[in-house]
Structure formats: C-alpha cells, structure tokens
Amino acid sequence: MKKIRIVLIFSYLLACTFIASAQFKPHYVNMTEVGGLFGRVVYDIPWSVPVQQQVENRLSLTLQTFNGVQLKPRMAVGLTTGLDWYQSALLMPVAAGIRYDLAKSKNNVTLLGMLDAGYGFQWLHADATGYKTDGGMMISPGLGLKFGLKSGSALVLSLSYKRQHAKSTEPLGWGEIEKWENRVYNRMAVRFGFVF
C-alpha cells in the first residue's frame, strides 16, 4: 500500500511537470549589447628609483551577444561571445551564459540577472614583434533592466562586473632569461542592447 502511494504521488508530480512544460514551449533568444568597460589600473613607472606606481582610469569598448534557448518563462541558457578592446589586448570571450528574470514584469520592465563564465581567446589580437598575448579565464555576473516592446522584443540596459585573466610574454632585455606579465582585468561593464 505504501509503495502504491509513492508511485501515485510520483506519477502526480510527473504529470504536473509535464502539463507545466507543455504550456511553455522553449524558443530561441538573442541578447546583443554594446557598451564600455570601466576600470582603474596601477602599474610601475619604468626606470624609476625607488619604484613608483602610476594609477590611471581606463575605458574600453565591449560588444557582446548571448544566443540561447528560453527553457522556462523566466530562464534562458546559452552561449555568450563578443569582443573586448583593452588598451594592450583584443580578447574574444566565449562563455556559457544564463539569463534569469529576477522579478516579474511591472509596466513591461523586468529586473534581469545575468551570469557568464568561460575563456577569453586572443584569436583576433595582433602582437608586436617579440610579444605574445594569451587569453585566460573570465567570469561576469550582472544585473539589467529589460524594457518590453509591443513587438515582443525588448531593450536592455545592464551593469555587470567582468574579471578577465590574460598573460603577456615580452621581449627579453639584457641579462633576462624570461619576461612575462600576468594581467587581471577587473572592469565594470555598462551596456545597452536588444533582446529578441
């Protein structure tokens, strides 16, 4: 009798899940954005004795597109790719991405949560003679506002944090056996784009 109840309960839950999923059909979704990467860098001033550091603000251009499947009414998963133009590197991040509506739409405005994690490749970067740039791991959590349009598409304004690793190998100077620099780009990204 106990096994029959468990089977009935399991069957009921499975049927409810099937009915709920039958009411929503997964479909393709795209979010394409353009914006800026804002940050500050600290670096050593060459040939200063004692070593002195300089701090500068940086602004870089970023393009990003998310292509995925809307699995549930509030959640989409897919692949994110784009281009990030840092001062000394052009990186192409390729990442797994998720987009989730955190709050239900009010007046066609929805709070959107975003997370991308992957690797930044240097495929389009051109190095000067003697230099070699390698990409690295990348993670980018963020929030956005999605403004629904009558056509079913939406405008999106997002703010996210982006952490991108990279490595640069540089020409050897006198008496040097190796010369490289690990870079970590910590940036705030402000983007504007479209969802359809």
Image (spheres, rainbow, N blue to C red):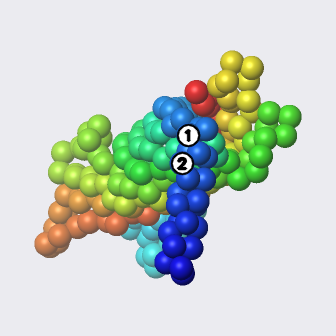
Residue 195 appears at what percent x and percent y? 60, 31
Say which mark, if any, is on residue 6.
none
Secondary structure at numbered mark 1: helix
Left or right, residue 20 beside residue 48: right
- The quarter of the picture where residue 126 lies is top left
Residue 41: percent from the left, percent from the top? 53, 60
- Is 169 located above or below residue 191 in the figure? below
Q: Residue at x 36, y 51 (%)?
A: 120
Secondary element at tag 2: helix
Identity of the residue drawn at 41% across and 44% down: 79
The kind of residue tagged 2 is Phe
| Residue 18 circle label | 2
Q: Is residue 186 left or right of residue 178?
A: right
Residue at image x 26%, y 41%?
123
Q: Is residue 49 above or below residue 56?
A: below
List the residue tagged with mark 1. 22
Q: Is residue 164 left or right of residue 53?
A: left
Measured as percent of width and height from the top left, residue 88 is found at: 39, 48
Q: Is residue 26 visible?
A: yes
Q: Is there any visible trace of residue 141 in the rendered image?
A: no
User: Relative to 133, is 48 above or below?
Assistant: below
Label 1 packing within 10 angstroms: few (<14), some (14-19), many (20+)? few
**Towards the viewer: 73 or 124:** 73
Disc 2 residue crowd, few under 14, some 14–19, many 20+, Cα 10 Å: few
- Looking at this view, is 98 or 118 the one in front? 98
Residue 146's spot in the image, x, y percent? 71, 37
Quadrant where the C terminus lies? Answer: top right
Circles 1 and 2: CB atoms closer than 8 Å: yes
- Quadrant position of residue 90: top left
Q: Front-most of 42 and 136?
A: 136
Mark 1 residue type: Ala
* Separation (CA) of disc 1 from disc 2: 6 Å
